[in-house]
Image (tube, helix red, strand yellow):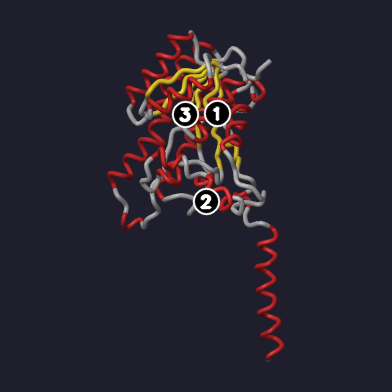
Amino acid sequence: MGMLDGKVAIVTGATSGIGARTAELFAEEGATVVLAGRRADVGHDLATRIGQSASFVQTDVAEADQVRSLIEGTAARFGRLDVLFNNAGTGIPHRSIVDLDIVEYDALMALLVRSVAVGMKYAAPIMIRQRSGSIINTGSVAAFRAGAGSQTYCAAKAAVVHFSKVVAAELGEYGVRVNSLSPGAIVTGIFGKGIGIDPNVADAQTDLLTARFAKSQPIPRAGMPDDIARGALYLASDASSFVNGIDLLIDGGMITGNRFSQATAGRGEIQKVLRDDAAAR
C-alpha cells in the first residue's frame, strides 16, 4: 500500500531535478500525478516513463491563466485535487543592488512568488469543498541566509516561506494544510539555468556539482533531488495530517553553520597567532 494511494497530485517544475523526482516518487506511492512544466518534449517523455498514472500538461506558471487551467482542468478530469506542489523555479546571477535589472526582477518574482500565490488561489476552492488537501511550496535556505542565492532569489524565497504560513492559518480551518520545504545545496540543473545555460545542457551538468556540494553542510555528501522528494512525500501524505504552517528545512545542516571541524580549525589558527605573538613580546 502506497502513502498516496487514491490521491491526485500536481507537481510544477516537473521536467527536471526536484520536480521530476517528486513526480516519480508520488506515482510510486500510488498517486495519480499531473506533471507541469514548459518543456513539452521532456515532460511527455517523463510522464511516459513513469507510466499510466502520470500525464503532462505544458504550463508556464508565470502565466496566471495557464496555472488556473492546469489546476481546474486536473480537478475536472479526476474529480478532485489532493496535492499541489508549487515547485517551479530558476535563479539569476549574483550582482550588486546597484546593478539590479528591474525587468529581470519582475520576471523572477512572477515565477517564484506570484505563481505560488496563483496556485494557492485556484487550488483553495477545490480543497475547501473537499475539506482536505495539502499544498506544498518550495522555499530555500536562501530565505534565511544572505548570499545563498541572488538578492532577488533570497527575497522571493523568504516571501514564499512566509506566504505559506499566512495561507496555512486561513485554510487550516477547512482541513487544508499549507507548508513549505526549503532545500539546501541540491544537485540540480537550476544553477546552470540561472546563468543562462540551455536547460537541457544544465540538466546534464549535475555531476559537476556533486563533489562541491558535499562540502556545503555538516553532512558530508551532496543533497540530491530524492532527499527533497521524500520530504514532499511526507507533507503530501496523511502521515503529516497534523502538520500545518511549517517550513521543512532539508539542507544537511547547512543552516546551522560551519562544520565543527572547520570551526575548530579556524579557532586553532587564531590561537596559534595569539600564542606566537605572546611568545614574541
- Residue 176 at what x, y percent from top left? 55, 20
Tell me which residue sits at (61%, 36%) in the image.
227
Task: Estimate how packed mark 3 is, as few (under 14), some (14 to 19) or many (20 or more) residues with alpha carbons within 10 Å.
Answer: many
| The disc label shown at residue 145, or none | 2
Tell me which residue sits at (50%, 18%) in the image.
54
User: Looking at the picture, which amino acid does disc 3 mark?
Assistant: Ala
| Residue labelled with disc 3 | 14
**Residue extending furthest toward the bottom:** 281
Task: Estimate how packed mark 2 is, as few (under 14), some (14 to 19) or many (20 or more) residues with alpha carbons within 10 Å.
Answer: few
- Residue 161 at what x, y percent from top left? 50, 37
Mark 1 touches mark 3? (CB < 8 Å): yes
Query: In the depicted view, which residue is nearer to us: 114 or 185?
Result: 185
Q: Is residue 257 above or below residue 35?
A: below
Tell me which residue sits at (35%, 35%) in the image.
110
Query: CA separation, marks 3 and 2?
Result: 26 Å
Tell me the mark number nearer the camera, choosing from 2 and 1.
Answer: 1
- Residue 237 at what x, y percent from top left? 62, 22
Tell me which corner region of the image, top left, top right, bottom left or bottom right, holds residue 116.
top left
- Residue 159 at what x, y percent from top left? 45, 39
Q: Secondary structure at mark 3?
A: loop
| Residue labelled with disc 1 | 22
